Image: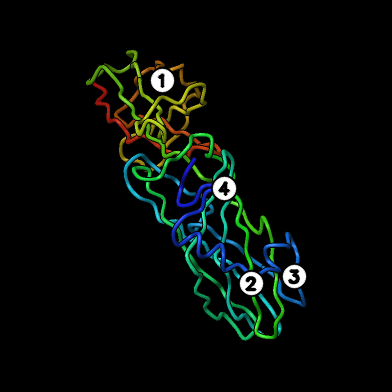
Amino acid sequence: MRMRATLGVVTGALALSALAVPAAQADTRDGGYGDTTITKVVVDGDNKVSVGISAAKTIKVSVTAKDDSGIAGADEFTLEGPGYGFLITDKPTCTEVSSTTSTCTASVVVDPKVDYLSNASAGTWYVDAWIDANDGDYIWKEKAGSFNFQRASKLTVNASPEPVKKGATLTVTGKLTRANWESLKYAGYSGQSVKLQYRKSGTSTYTTLKTIKTNTYGDLKTTVTASADGYYRYSFAGTTTTPAVNATGDYVDVQ
């Protein structure tokens, strides 16, 4: 797999950043000197990164650290995941939160049209971080934080017939798909539990009617009894590898 950097094959600016790593960092796994600590790691705001098949995605990484003397700076963050997933951010910019604490922020771009993403790389990724303090203290921590690197998802719904008589049977179909990074197409997500939900016209809350599973092709199909005008949708809670998604509600006129 090749992203901005491939495990074992680092080129261009990334090669330069790799050569610039201090010797102590290269030889140390988790370690440090003094009282420097990492207190928080946030990736893309909610520790979830969803990548589709066409648009480039900028991944923002923020690491908050503390030292009695204050934080001087940080080296590029390393992001590692399954399927030989490996990324290196640009040089972090550290912003002082207080006299002892700073948040260091950096980013890296993933483009599915240019980078060779492997479906096996979807899942839990980890952030490795090196932080320097003003007094010469430092901390190097592998797996300082984690996030889900996910294949973008889509979900559809269609309730028929429309309009329908009250008490008659409605057939509700749909399809759950997710990005296939290797073919650059969306493909059915099989064997997943999906909720069929209903919102009565004039209200704002969906209620779950039943839970069904997608078939081999990601297709969904079930029946319900029509009771009143309202909206039907499918709702997928998501997995580590695939984000949660709701279908746009399909309005049914009950006569």
Q: Disc number at residue 8?
A: 4
Amino acid tagged 4: Gly
Left or right: residue 34 compared with residue 129:
right
Sooner in the amino-acid sequence: mark 2 or mark 4: 4
Q: Toward which corner of the image does residue 145 lie, by quadrant?
A: bottom right
Q: Amino acid at mark 1?
A: Leu
Place of residue 13 in the rendered image (x, y in percent of width and height, measured from the top left): 45, 62
The answer for how far apart the CA atoms under marks 4 and 1 are is: 42 Å
Query: Label 4 near label 2: C-beta < 8 Å?
Result: no
* Residue shown at the point (50%, 24%) measured from the top left: 211
Residue 110, percent across and down? 41, 50
Q: Looking at the image, is mark 3 or mark 2 earlier in the sequence?
A: 3
Quarter holding residue 12: bottom left
Relative horizontal placement of residue 242, taking residue 234 as reference (left or right): right
What is the spatial separation of the Cα atoms under label 2 and label 4, in whole angstroms? 24 Å
Q: Residues within 10 Å of mark 4 (few under 14, many from 20)?
A: few
Query: Disc 3 versus disc 4: distance between alpha carbons?
Result: 26 Å
Determine crowd level at label 3: few under 14, some 14-19, many 20+ residues with C-alpha closer than 10 A: some
Q: Nearer the viewer, residue 203 or 171?
A: 171
Determine which residue is flagged by label 2: 131
